[in-house]
Amino acid sequence: MKQFTCTLLLITLVLLVGLPLLAADAPLTVLEPATTLTVTPRTADRAHWAWNQPMAAITPTGDLQWQPLPFHFAKGASVRYIDFAQGNDDGDGSQAHPWKHHPWDPAATGTAKGCTGTQTYVFKGGVTYRGQLIAQESGTPGDPIRLTRDPAWGTGEAVISGAEVVTGWTLGADNKDMPDAGKVWWADVPFLVRNVWQAETARSQRIPLARIPHWKVSDPNDPMNEWWTLEQPEWWTGKWKINFNGHRMHEGIDTKHLTQPAEYYIGAVMRPEFAVVMGTPFPTRVEGFDAEKKGLIFQGIWFNDSEQEWTGNRYYLEDKPQFLDADGMFWADKRGNGSRIYLRLPGDRDPNTTTIEVGRQFNLIESHGMSDVVISGLTFRYTNTYWDLIQASWGNPDVDNAAIRVRGSCVGLTVANCRFDHLSGKALMVDAKNANQQFDRLAFNDNDLDTLDHGAINIECGGRGDVEVLRNRMFDIGSRPQRQDWGHALQISFPQFMHVAGNMLTRCYGAGIFVFGGKGGGDKRDVALSRSLIHDNRVVDSLLAANDWGGIETWQCGPHYLYNNISGNAVGYWNCTYHGAKGSACLGYNYYFDGSFRNAVFNNVAWGGTKDRESKFFGQSAMNQAVPTIENSFFNNTFADFVHATDWSPAGGRRWI
């Protein structure tokens, strides 16, 4: 009877949704980010239901394409104008006499500094605002504080940047450890520098921190294929876990590449993969060097000798002046609270002939609690990274940074039609998980996210409130996560209700969509009527630098309704296990239900790299269900190019397929 009731409920939901089913023999077309196709918009005959809204366009081949709602300028009763280039804080904040600074900026003075209350703040188009906003006030329901732009005022994007333009570069380095010092340019700045961009075109070029080897992404499915490889002979005996400087540590052996003296390596930041599973590269410090065995001595991801280093784990080293021995890199020397930046642009170009942006601010809008705030139509760009690259977020909050960061109560926050690009952290981070904090009505919709180091969105709700993340585009997410993080693109933890739909994700180094429903383990509270709607999303090329996750993954309490999604090429390449044998290369899943209950999974598409198990990038399986999990139903899904359609744990709970 229970099975019949559950199946009837799901069939009814399909009929109510009224969306076209994807036929089993329909061709699958993989779209490049820049591809333009003629699309057929959906019609919604029951538009008042959230799950029946048109969230994406359908191409003639059955693929999904981004279809954001357009930006519309909206304002409240009182409007103040901000022009960082020509404004004056002693003006009245009118369009004729705009302010230079937003009142939330610690640098604000005069009339601007004294402005409070419910205002609409309009940033001028074509102008870059440089600084940080600390939000210490809120709007009211129906009358929010707005940060926005007016397309009729200025031309181009209204940018909030965490960087400073650095000029006055001098040729010739003064560092004795730096090779080819005569080709190196330098400049001094009064802050600590971790990120540099050459920004003379529409798409900025990131200048890497000095590193060895001088790798690039030459294989799109394996971004780490040009890294060096640890040898670790007989690693299973534990011989490469040693006592050093009062700690248990790893010793990583590489006789092929580690040919320099100890001082060349000690103090460098190392970014190794680890085993057994997950494997996300993490930053750690080289604390010693075994010249005889050619071994780097370092602590694990959880410090000391945590996790394992197997034969085949890859790594690279960075942040030493000795590594600045080729063009296209930089290094920064800490001098008090400032830095001397040493720079070699691609082609050894003179930096005085181009625009060099250097990250300064960690977070662009920061709050310890806000309500009824709307941020729309703005561009957020260029943030800095905390100086100590090996620090975990529990050691300093700025390790886990974001363009918009709220650490405290968050009610009625809307972020819409914004652009986030070249950020060291995330676009949005909300941490309202504590019992004494409030959370509700968060919307992150119709935004464009491009090239973010740590991940894209992280929302922690504490078992309450509504979240919607709709119609966002995310590209190149999570390539350089902070320590003890995984670089997942979209992570939502324990709202009462979530709606995740119409999001287009391409090239995610961790998981794409990674959500937790209801409440966490051990939480004794009731989370009544918890539910998740996850539909019309497209996640392609995920798990590029990690394994044992899902392109789309749910955790904990449902019901989770997953329908009309596409998850393609969830790679999960596992170099330390690949020996050319069948089934040894990949541990990635397109859909993963990990300790996840009451999933209704229908009308979804998944495709893998290949079903050839001897291939380096074979498709492991379209779906995986890990224990413990019960009451899951799967029907009308389409899978192609996998070794297995599903991988189920034998201890998994009741399910219907």
Image: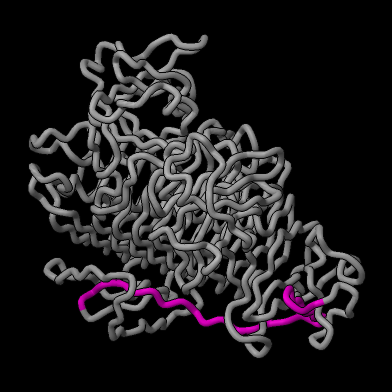
What colouring style does the render use? one colour
The answer to whether 41 appears left or right of 492 in the picture is left
- Say whether residue 441 is visible: no
Question: Which residue sits at x=39%, y=42%?
Answer: 596
Question: Which residue sits at x=27%, y=51%?
Answer: 570
Question: Which residue sits at x=53%, y=55%?
Answer: 196
Q: Position of residue 323 (x, y in %)?
A: 42, 39
Q: Is residue 83 above or below residue 240?
A: below
**Residue 452 vs residue 543, the one in the foreground:** 452
Q: Position of residue 222 (x, y in %)?
A: 26, 48
The stretch in magenta equals 61-87
- Say whether residue 92 is visible: yes
Question: Which residue sits at x=81%, y=60%?
Answer: 107
Q: Is residue 442 above or below residue 195?
A: below
**Residue 383 vs residue 280, the one in the foreground:** 383
Q: Position of residue 644 (x, y in %)?
A: 14, 46
Q: Disc count in the image?
A: 0
Residue 73 forms part of the magenta stretch: yes
Q: Position of residue 2 (x, y in %)?
A: 32, 47
Q: Is residue 200 above or below residue 293?
A: below
Q: Name the quadrant containing residue 534.
A: bottom left
The answer to whether 25 appears left or right of 220 in the picture is left
Residue 31 forms part of the magenta stretch: no
